[in-house]
Image: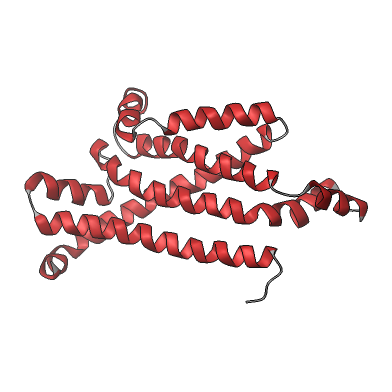
Amino acid sequence: MLAFFIKYHDKLLAALWEHLEIVGITIILSIFLAVLLTAFIMRSRLLSQIAVSFFGLIYSIPSLALFALLIPLSGLGVRTAILVLLIYNQFILVRNILAGFEAVNPAIIEAATGMGMSAWQSFWRVRFPLASPMIIAGIRIAIVSTIGIATIAATINAGGLGTILFDGLRTHNTPKLLWGTILASLLAVVANQLLSLIEKKTIKKVQGKRE
């Protein structure tokens, strides 16, 4: 195992970097789109329910099937992988952003308004900070999910750690298979732990607790 890493560390690290690029681009685009969608639908409960149900239906489609459906439109490679991951993430992010804002007590908003805050000030100083733990939880879940599904995206020539994993599986190369699995798993675990820490700190801050 160690000898394989020493000999092929350049290829392993290159695949890891490709994976990080896919995940990074996907998450940035996903958050941006989710914020826009949520801003549009959050004023209507009916629209919110329709949007969450629609994205939930899309999320239930197996990733390989969705890749196959979009290949005729966007072709093989990173573009299709990012598009699929972007669509999947909307269910997680939109649902959590909506849940975060809906959980804010209306009485707190009324109190902020009574103190002379404008709608914009009330949003940034009161609503968003109170909703932030739920939003961060959604981002954490989306990142971990993206890391996993991006591995499968190697089947459509998107690159990343999946190329190492599936090539090892295809050639019965156990060290390559294990290193692909280990790096993908390690990436997901590290991301989850870091974001869990941020989430816990945010919750403490919202609750007014000291470190």
- Whether residue 158 is visible here, answered yes or no, is no
Please determine whether, in this image, residue 61 is positioned above or below residue 185.
above
Residue sitting at x 69%, y 47%: 103
Q: Number of labelled discs? A: 0
Between 25 and 194, the one nearer to me in the picture = 194
For this view, does 197 lie left or right of residue 123? left
Q: Quadrant of the C terminus?
A: bottom right
Please determine whether, in this image, residue 179 is positioned above or below residue 29.
below
Residue sitting at x 29%, y 55%: 184
Q: How is the image coloured?
A: secondary structure
Please determine whether, in this image, residue 209 is positioned above or below residue 133.
below
> How far across and how far down the image is residue 126, in percent?
77, 55
Q: Quadrant of the N terminus?
A: bottom left
Q: Residue furthest bottom?
A: 211
> How far across and how far down the image is residue 117, in percent?
87, 53
Residue sitting at x 17%, y 58%: 178
> How far across and how far down the image is residue 78, in percent?
34, 40
Q: Residue furthest left?
A: 172
Residue sitting at x 36%, y 28%: 74
For this view, does 153 lie left or right of residue 127? left
Query: In which image quadrant can residue 202 be found?
Result: bottom right
Between 118 and 59, the one nearer to me in the picture = 59
Between 133 and 27, the one nearer to me in the picture = 133
- Whether residue 153 is visible here, answered yes or no, is yes
For this view, does 104 lie left or right of residue 35? right
> How far across and how far down the image is residue 75, in percent?
31, 29
For this view, does 198 lie left or right of residue 61? right
